[in-house]
Amino acid sequence: ENIDIDISQHEELLVSDVIKRISRFTNAQIILNETSIKIRGISGDVRDAKANIEEHLTGVYHGYIDLEVSQFGRVKSSVTKDPSHFQRINESTGADVTLESEAIHLSGKKSNVKKAKASVMDYLDFVISRQLQTVKITHRSLFKSMGDPGRLAQIATETGASISLDRDISSVLIRSDDPNDCDKAVELVNSMMVECQRLIAVIRFDTSDAWLLSVIVGKGGSSIKKLEKDTDCSINIFKDEVTVVISADSEEIVKAGKDALENITQQAKKECIFIDLPESSMPAFIGKGGAGIKKMSADNDVNVERTKKHPSTIKITGKEHCVASAHNAVL
């Protein structure tokens, strides 16, 4: 699949991390050229990658729910008799919902399409109950492994059900005219999920510890690259979730990577601390012209500063024993 682009779009994509971000969650191969973007892979991965790229370029996202021929016929009949179902979804989410060639097509802002797709799935559960089932994926870091085309094709062959990964609703979709086929596939996909979960570690930080993410990454990505090399793990940062995901080929390697990461963060917390002070005492602590903070810094060989987001909080950084000494001095 090719997407034509102009010079300005090519330059924008070169400096942005859009292609990289999309590649993190799909098994499709994305190649950026001066006049086009080439996407290779299985149809579902290619369609998802294309939808995300076009959404970035145009602001319009396209999502789909594929159906079996007989299922599409029943849905079409239901919508034709009572179009109010799709109309309500359209009005409540802001996404356009239409039927086209054995699929339900949704378009609009990506967030609206995701909401609409969840509503459409509820509607389908009523119209074609048990003929379309889902297995929820616990974290998007599992998209690649749970979307493994070989594994999904094997389950489809064994059960007779059609299986695909739907990243919009973080689920594996399983469909068949025979609900028993779906039940068998659900069982196998759940087993696959358990296997995949063993090969990742999801570490979530409190929002107050979000600063640790920059420590893990390091200047120019130096720290995270070294950590990956030393542990033989793949490490992904999800800033919007304040989360780090470690993955590897074995549970033992994942555990070693997790332990190494925890050592880094624990040490970082000893070399960088935050202390809340009463607002009334802050002027005296800072001192005239910052004399108080400067003296505290010099006496303990640390750096002391007042945080911008929280004026009543001070940040102390330096060597572990120096930070501990400054901490005691403040208290």
Image (cartoon, rainbow, N blue to C red):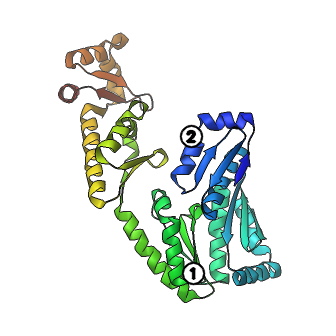
| Image vertical order of residue 306 relative to residue 2, above or below | above
Where is mark 2, residue-wise? 17
Task: Please say whether residue 216 is visible from this viewpoint.
Answer: no
Q: Identify the residue shown where x is 26% and y is 58%.
A: 252
Going by the numbered disc 1, the residue's amino acid type is: Ala
Q: Quadrant of residue 114?
A: bottom right
| Viewer-side residue, 261 vs 30 | 30
| Image vertical order of residue 212 relative to residue 219, above or below | below
Residue 188 pos. (x, y %): 45, 78
Q: What is the crowding at mark 1: few (fewer than 14 residues within 10 Å), some, or many (at least 20)?
A: many
Disc 1 is placed on an element classified as loop
Where is mark 1, residue-wise? 161
Going by the numbered disc 2, the residue's amino acid type is: Asp
Q: Identify the residue shown where x is 29% and y is 47%.
A: 231
| Viewer-side residue, 68 vs 238 | 68
Q: Quadrant of residue 303?
A: top left
Disc 2 is placed on an element classified as loop
